[in-house]
Image (cartoon, helix red, strand yellow):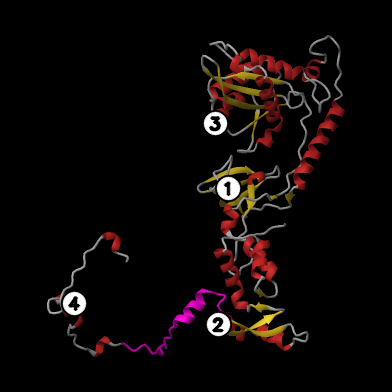
Amino acid sequence: MLIEEFGPQFEHVEGHNNVVADTLSRIEIEHRDRDEMETGDEAIQLSYMNTDEAVAEEFPMNPKLIRREQQTDEELKKKMADDQNQRFAMKPVEGVELVHMNGKIYVPLSLRERIISWYHQFLVHPGRTRMEATIRQNFTWPGLTPQVDNYCKTCHECQLFKKQRKKYGHLPPKQAELSPWTTVCVDLIGPYKVRTPRKVHELRAMTMLDPATGWFEIAPINKPNSDETQRAFDSYWLARYPRPREICFDNGKEFKWLFAELCENMGIGKKPTTEYNPQANAMIERVHQVLGNALRTFELENQQLSKINPFEPFLTATAYAIRSTYHTTLKATPGQLVFGRDMLLPTQFKADWASIALRKQKLIDESNARENKKRIQHEYKVGDKVLLERPGIQPKMSAPRDGPFEVVHVSTNGTVRIQKGAVTQRVNIRRLTPYFERSPSGSVCHSTTD
């Protein structure tokens, strides 16, 4: 059968014509004593399985195999000898007398791991509860529950391919931004396609935000590259407002090279966020939602957009609206906090920064506590193995995570650095799941605190 795919043709060669086989089978060899060597070892007596024994070895629930292992299980013999409550009894299964405990087949120690493995593999990786309940339909032994739990917990395929809602590791506390013009958060939006009756336009822009006051700027850009971002940041922020001490941005390539050079020349410290972790730049992401809702109200698809800077008037109007609208956390408009007066009327405004600081920190702490309440306490350590969640929406049949990867550094800000091949990557613990390895003895060999 192995060579059928090659399409061979078989021809019968009669014995007197099959000289090759005839020569090999009847070759005369002279026996020489020096060809023999004494080893001094006693010859090993070989033994062979019959068909029934071979089947029993492959199928761990075979009654003959269970009976054989029950007869040699010292733990079972002791339990039966001390059985005062008559929990043990002999019952036939497929014509074989087996020891039962409380009406279920008692599995000896030597077969427990094999039976769990068989159920898990051949029932296509059921969860802990369903798998234990299925095994208990027919079998029992002491410690069945923790053994099933451990096996499912350390299953490589289950950890890598099953979707789960468990999140591990508490997020560290955050500090609210309180000093105006100290930090600026930047990001990109787009491309947003706008189909007008005459043309399809693409909207791309760079957004900038002072997290202390909520002051917002937006600059249209042509392409998402470092040349455009450094131009927009220089023209729309640095040329208008006090120099910030640090700048927060994601790990996109548009915030490297020329953009990074501008920050270095101005002495601005860079705070890049981890990949696919929008919560790290949450304030500007929230403004993006407001921005999107506002732009949709202009019904851009029904507008006669200009050939030059088609979106600039709409972006300008939206930015003005965000600066002039009351902020529920700040209890003021960004314009009032920046200029000390209303954006429309010459009414004076004095900011109570102490109250604003307490209010902002309280909301941050409450939000952090809510998120941590849904997470399992876990401390990542150097040397741990972890799985990394894949970003975005994955195809139904694709694995939701990659790994395992080794943790090489743990930071106090909720990020760790993992080894991915020849390079390392800094990731937020929101994207990580601990990987539990199975030791040769069947126990978990991954240090956890859950």
Magenta stretch in the rendered image? 37-65
- Amino acid of disc 2: Lys
First reached walking from the N terminus: tag 3 or tag 2? 2
Please give left or right for residue 347 compared with residue 86 in the image. Answer: right
Q: Which residue is mark 4?
A: 21
Residue drawn at x 53%, y 74% is 59
Query: Residue 253: which numbered mark, if any?
Result: 3
Secondary structure category for the residue under label 1: loop
User: How many neighbours does mark 1 have within 10 angstroms: few (below 14), some (14-19), or many (20 or more)?
Assistant: many
Query: Is 59 covered by the magenta stretch?
Result: yes
Q: CA distance from mark 3 to mark 1?
A: 25 Å
303 or 155, which lies in front? 303
- Amino acid of disc 4: Ala
**Of the two numbered discs 3 and 1 in the rendering, the one whose residue sits closer to the viewer:** 1
**Of the two numbered discs 1 and 2 in the rendering, the one whose residue sits closer to the viewer:** 2
2 or 242, which lies in front? 2
368 or 146, which lies in front? 146
Q: Residue furthest left?
A: 17
State the image coordinates of residue 180 (x, y, percent, origin top left).
76, 24
Q: Which residue is mark 2?
A: 64
Dominant secondary structure, magenta: loop
Specify the quadrant of the image occupied by residue 436.
Answer: bottom right
- Amino acid of disc 3: Lys
User: How many neighbours does mark 2 have within 10 angstroms: few (below 14), some (14-19), or many (20 or more)?
Assistant: many
- Using the rendered image of the protein, determine whether residue 445 is visible from the camera's viewpoint: no
Q: Is residue 374 above or below residue 359?
A: below
Q: Which residue is mark 1?
A: 400
Q: Residue furthest top?
A: 346
Q: CA distance from mark 1 to mark 2?
A: 42 Å
